[in-house]
Amino acid sequence: MRKFLFLFLVAIVAVVNFALWGWLNRPVDVGIDWAKPVQSMSFAPFRKGQSPLEMIYPSPEQVEEDLLALKGQAEGVRVYTSQEGMEVLPDLARKHGFDLTFSAWLGVTPEVNEAEVTALIEAANAHPDVIKRVIVGNEVLLRGDLTPEELIAFIRRVKAEVQQPVSYADVWAFFLKYPEVAEEVDFLTIHILPYWEDEPVSVRDAERHLIEIYDKMALSFPDKPLMIGESGWPTMGRDRGPAQPGVANAAHYVRSLAKVAEERGIQYNVVEAFDQYWKSKLEGTVGGAWGVLDVDRRVKFTMSGPVVENPDWPFLAAGSAALGAVAALVLFWRRREEKLPGLIGGVAAASLLSALLLAAAHVAAEGSFSPLGHLGVAVRILLLGGFVYAVLAALRVPEQAPTRLGQALLLALAGIYVTWAALLAWDGRYRDIPYADVTVLGVGIALLSISGFLRSGLAGMAFGPMFGGVLPAAPRFADKAVAGLLLLGAIAACASEGIALARGQDFITLHPELSERVPLILKATVANTQMNIFAFMLILTAIPFWANGAALRRGGRVRMDEAKLH
């Protein structure tokens, strides 16, 4: 009878598991439908293992395959270089009916700049029927690679030698900062990326922001035609304040962009066609995830109809249910627990931690694009897996819990995430937030704390009782110090959003008064959902260390009182 009850509980939890995964990935109506191809997409046909940073470029066959993958998705494409495999693109664009915005990539190397501009001029003159416009440099002023004067010299040279309209592309604010550059071009190519703004914008407010910036630029440069050269939304990565990556959010934004552009007669280009894994080295996970198609050339979302955040969720649900069932069978099958609540609690804890562990592994693996990144993910997940085992073992038989394993893993993980929090505060704009990882840690600690409190009151929440002992040969203040570092990490993580905003030059320009900036900085500090989860889980992790320090102090006082009595 007991075995039947146990299997019944496992089955119930598996059903709940599937229901939760399904609910989180239910089809979402994003509120906008668009039945046409977009005007243009940024086209960088790099595959896995290819990167301009390592000078590994796509073959002509791959360029054509990727261009064909955009049939029905876009009417034209924008490229960022006149070389690096893009030499074949004008003929392919003509062959397959795409308009082409051709560009020269400018940077800090004079020889590369000269080759890029020469190739751009030659391509534009050889293919005037398909190359509709040319762009000289992309975000050169943002990166500080050239001075405005150096950039203007290249623009003038290209204008003198081609028939097409000539532009320069950069974040909108840099044309306001360097109006002399705007005067030199035939039209302005402005980048409006609500997610990347110094003051990030949520996807629901992004359309309003797009219109406001476009109108601001039109008013500032009334004699210059405008083209939105980059606008889009990432599908995975870290939150930036209220700006949250995701497939549904990306679908909403791109559809909204297309609708607004047609209503107002705006030329635009969506960034971008395909995920660019190589960008993760520069911008973290989010940098590689702006594609309308993923790196395997699968369309992430259509331009009409409901959107599913993760179409592969049934596999994750099955894996989660299986892992939870195995953990419950291994640790609780032979448990001599007479009371039903204990059995239910054990099966539920095994299933919950297994589901969170698999979710953390999935999030971490999705954001890993290099061998070194894969190694880091493997180490973190192995440590978390060992921690989950230690927690479940402590719940199973508290008096026989594996002391050394629990201590070592908890300390190692606490050290990793406190360091991560410090790095976020130091320079966190492009750094991922390991919220899914730390959720495993925090929930595991919470389960142990609840179990210990139910058994022994406040004393049962201490680090020692959880894992069958105390920190061996450690100073009495060590537990309290670890707890303090975890709490400081939580504060630093939340503060990182406000710090990043306060440093933004555009933010300072738009809000010159300190009295105006401070409330916005405070608001940014608490606006990031992922960061809030991360900080809260660090606080949960601090509880047993703090409780253990208190327990040690009480134990010391008891021993002193006993000595006085004798």
Image (tube, rainbow, N blue to C red):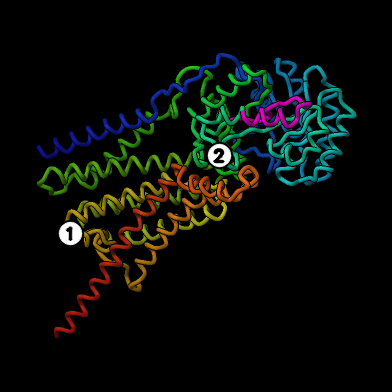
First reached walking from the N terminus: tag 1 or tag 2: 2
Query: Compared with residue 226, is residue 284 higher up or lower down, i.e. above or below?
Result: below
Helix, strand or loop at disc 2? loop
Label drawn at residue 456? 1
Question: Horizontal placement of 222 versus 375: left or right?
Answer: right
For the magenta stretch, what is the residue range? 212-232
**Residue 3: where, in percent of width, then height?**
14, 38
Determine the residue positioned at 44% across, 57% down: 489
Helix, strand or loop at disc 1? helix
Instruction: Indicate the quadrant where residue 483 lies.
Output: bottom left
Query: Compared with residue 74, is residue 473 higher up or lower down, i.e. above or below?
Result: below
Q: Pointer 1: residues within 10 angstroms few (<14), some, or many (20+)?
A: few
**Residue 401: where, in percent of width, then height?**
24, 58
Q: Is residue 221 magenta?
A: yes
Question: Horizontal placement of 464 versus 132: left or right?
Answer: left
Kind of residue sitting beneath label 2: Pro
**Quarter in which the C terminus is drawn:** bottom left
User: From where the camera sits, is residue 238 visible?
Assistant: no
Query: Compared with residue 85, is residue 355 higher up or lower down, i.e. above or below?
Result: below
- The answer to which of 429 and 353 lies nearer the viewer is 429
Query: Compared with residue 437, is residue 26 higher up or lower down, i.e. above or below?
Result: above
Q: Is residue 370 magenta?
A: no
Question: Horizontal placement of 405 versus 279: left or right?
Answer: left
Determine the residue positioned at 68% across, 43% down: 53
Mark 1 vs mark 2, CA separation in Å = 47 Å
Kind of residue sitting beneath label 1: Ser
Instruction: Indicate the quadrant where residue 197 lies.
Output: top right
Residue position for label 2? 200
